[in-house]
Amino acid sequence: MEDIKKAYEELGLEPFASKGLVEQRYDQALRKHRARTKQAALGQTLPDDGFDFDKITAAYRAILDYETKQYTEAFEQEEYGKYKKMAGQAKKLDHFWRYYKIHTFVAIGLVIALIYGIVAFIDRQEEKRYLASLPPIDLSISFIGNYFDTTDDKNFETTNEKFLTDFPEFQRVVTEMIYVPDDPSMQYAYLQKAMVMLMTETPDLYIADEAMKDWTFQQAGMYIELDNVESLSHLVDSKYAVKGAVQEDNVPIGPEHVYMIDLTESDLAKDLPIAHTKLLVGIRANAPNAEKALQFIEHYAATLPSEQ
């Protein structure tokens, strides 16, 4: 009991505070931890305020375990308490039948999983053989925002063909799409998926619309700075330069740089089978093919209308 009281104290709460307060306090700690992680990524000094997210998480889990145990005991009392002295035997009998019923379903599930696993393994081997037969990827591109493929291509074959036509020296271009609608009320789930893809995948180029441009600027160190790229120097002070600063809670926390080039009016839009409003293009900071990504921007930037 003392350990549970200490867990509540670790969260700055009175012992046995409501579940809502526990969730609220942990959510505050989680947001603070994320903010400190961003500060550390930017090389900023963290305040020595004794904040220990690991201890707070351990306390939070201890409280959840305690509440689960209390719920289980209350459930068993309600379920088997009516049997009084025979409650133990009633519980064992109930568990016995549940045990074997579950095992039956588990056995059926295992058979299905085994069949599925064999089929999936064969499919993976076929896919590996197919991918091994393809040339190396010259450029990988990710559209992020309110974009729609206007064809029925599952693998963006028409889009990739356009790029291969525009860059005959390339042998293979890979395109993917992270759809995020314009409507803010519908964006949350899509942004969660987008965040996972940003963390786990490394395309060379991002092509974003206006809303996603602002959102990606909030991710520290995501883009290569284009200010000092000699081949693009003539665009740095033009309307085509997309400038911004790394943000935290929509507040700039660093100097402004050119991170993207607006290629909406360039030949990038010509014959592009993807519905769009903006084509803002930036190079990912750890792009595997950064030189070819820059070549992509240079090529289409050369087709932009002159500013009058």
Image (cartoon, rainbow, N blue to C red):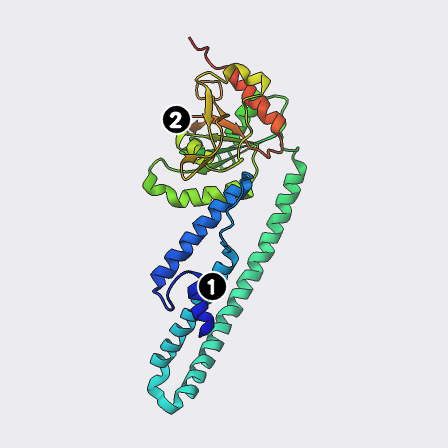
Instruction: Say whether residue 38 is left or right of residue 133.
Output: left
Mark 1 Cα shell of 10 Å, populated few (<14), some (14-19), many (≥20): many
69 up-or-down from 250: above or below? below
Residue under numbered circle 2: 277
Residue occupying the far bottom of the picture? 85
* Residue 149 spot, x, y in % from top left: 44, 32
Q: Residue at x 61, y 26 (%)?
A: 292
Label 2 sits on what residue type?
A: Thr
Q: Which mark is residue 59?
A: 1
290 up-or-down from 30: above or below? above
Q: Nearer the viewer, residue 73 or 178?
A: 73
Q: Secondary structure at mark 1?
A: helix
> How many numbered dots are placed on residues in this image?
2
Whole-angstrom CA distance, mark 2 to mark 1, is 48 Å
190 up-or-down from 147: above or below? below
Q: Nearer the viewer, residue 241 or 149?
A: 241
